[in-house]
Amino acid sequence: MSSNYGKYPYVSLAQIKNYLNITSVNEDARLSNLISFACGAVESYIGHEVLSNSYSEVFDGGKASVFVSRLPLQNVHSISEYDGTAYRVLNNPQSDGSSVTRINSNKVLSSSGGPVLKSRYKKFGDSSAFFNGSNDYLYSADSNDWFFGDSNFTIDMQVRANSYSANSIFISQAADADNLWSLGYDTTNGYTFRAVSGGTEIANVTHADTTGYSANTFYHIEVVRSGSSWAIYRNGTSLGTQNTSNVMPDISAPLEIARQNVPSSYQYFNGFMDEIRISHAARHTAAFTAPSYQHATDDSTVLLIHFDGTDNTATFQDDHATVEQFLFYPETGEITKNIGDGTGDFGLTIVGASKFRNYPRGVRVAYKSGYESGNIPNDLLMATMDYVKMLHKDRQESQSFTFQGENVQDRQLSSNFPPHIRRILDLYRVII
């Protein structure tokens, strides 16, 4: 596995200067170099990077569980399992690894016109959905899940428009022009979310600008309500906000994707969409990093469309209530094949535990592990700073040595850690 040991130091210059009681800037360059060296040496010894990062590993199948090599495991982005023909993506659990509580079933999606899946242009997975801008759209029956009232909610998706020369709607629920909500693009105001009840506009969260939009480019778009605060984001950057406590309208109409049900102003979308999600939760309340992987479902998700499938086919499905096909355990790094009932109960069964398909290198795992900045364990942080202190005072032994119990199979030490530091590092060490 490739590594970036020392590339992303997890100890700051300010922390070291405070620890060493140094106020002068004369030592800054030397201290910065020592920090990079010490962080790299520690990471090389413990066998993984400290700061959180995304990784991928491949495992042989035929087992009920596989274990990633880097801890702590924060999230499993995706698992692909070889089925003898191709690698197939397994359904995710919640982002903490647990099973989803399923109250409702997946929504039924129907199409009109001729939207199709396209594998050439996609943000994630196998494909995205293409809409021709003249009569293509998807719809799903009216549901209480489309009514937000005065509660928190988030609507987000990946959108690749073929042009920004005309108004277009990405997703909406409209009974008529006087009763609707919609998220789309306006040629005057850019990305805009509107809600109208009885002819009165009760929400308008807009960019109020048309700069920064490029055709044939995927953008992550998100509108969020958190209490009375509303915001619309493009690739994690806030474009506009609104403050209102108005209640969203309860509309008796289907949910529609790629148009709004207003005959005088359908505003069909022309382009590609991927990864549409509706949540009864405020996903973000400040700037964030745009998604790099498909969303996992959770108890707040009421619609999740990955748009995965075979090129030029027209089968569209919601996966928000699809049974997860694996669970994972952050503390141990274990990823377990789910038996398929969605309960997360791995008790004794007649057939035994479910296993990954038995193919060499048949399980591909993309995951995130490590510690977020500011949440690094204090003992690991102090051990590293103590090592920098030792290096700074030129007290490191000049001759390399090995510790009792080390052998040629062990990861070789890149530095001479004194016993009190090594005892702490051993708590975090992974021997492969």
Image: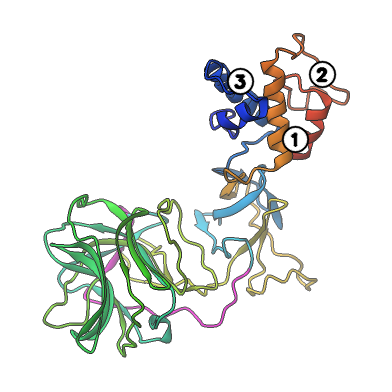
The residue type indicated by label 2 comes to Thr
> Reading the chain from its start, which is encountered first: label 3 or label 1?
3
Q: CA distance from mark 3 to mark 1?
A: 25 Å
Near-viewer residue (333 or 322) = 333
Q: Residues within 10 Å of mark 3 (few under 14, many from 20)?
A: some
Give the residue at mark 3.
Answer: 34
* Residue at 63 percent of width and 38 percent of height: 50
Give the label on residue 402, or none. Answer: 2
Quadrant of the rendered image containing residue 341: bottom right
Q: Is residue 240 visible?
A: yes
Return the residue nearer the eye: 342 or 197: 197
Q: Is residue 406 above or below residue 317?
A: above
Q: Which residue is mark 1?
A: 431
Q: Does dot 2 land on a helix, a strand or a loop?
A: loop
Judged left or right of residue 181, residue 89 is: right
Q: Residue 282: horizontal and vertical position, in percent?
A: 45, 68
Q: Indicate whether 340 appears above or below 92.
A: below
Q: Which residue type carries mark 3?
A: Leu
Can you tell which of label 1 and label 2 is closer to the viewer?
2
The N terminus lies in quadrant: top right
Magenta extent: 99-121
The C terminus: image quadrant: top right
Q: Front-most of 429 and 287?
A: 287
Q: Nearer the viewer, residue 5 or 431?
A: 5
How did the renderer colour the structure? rainbow
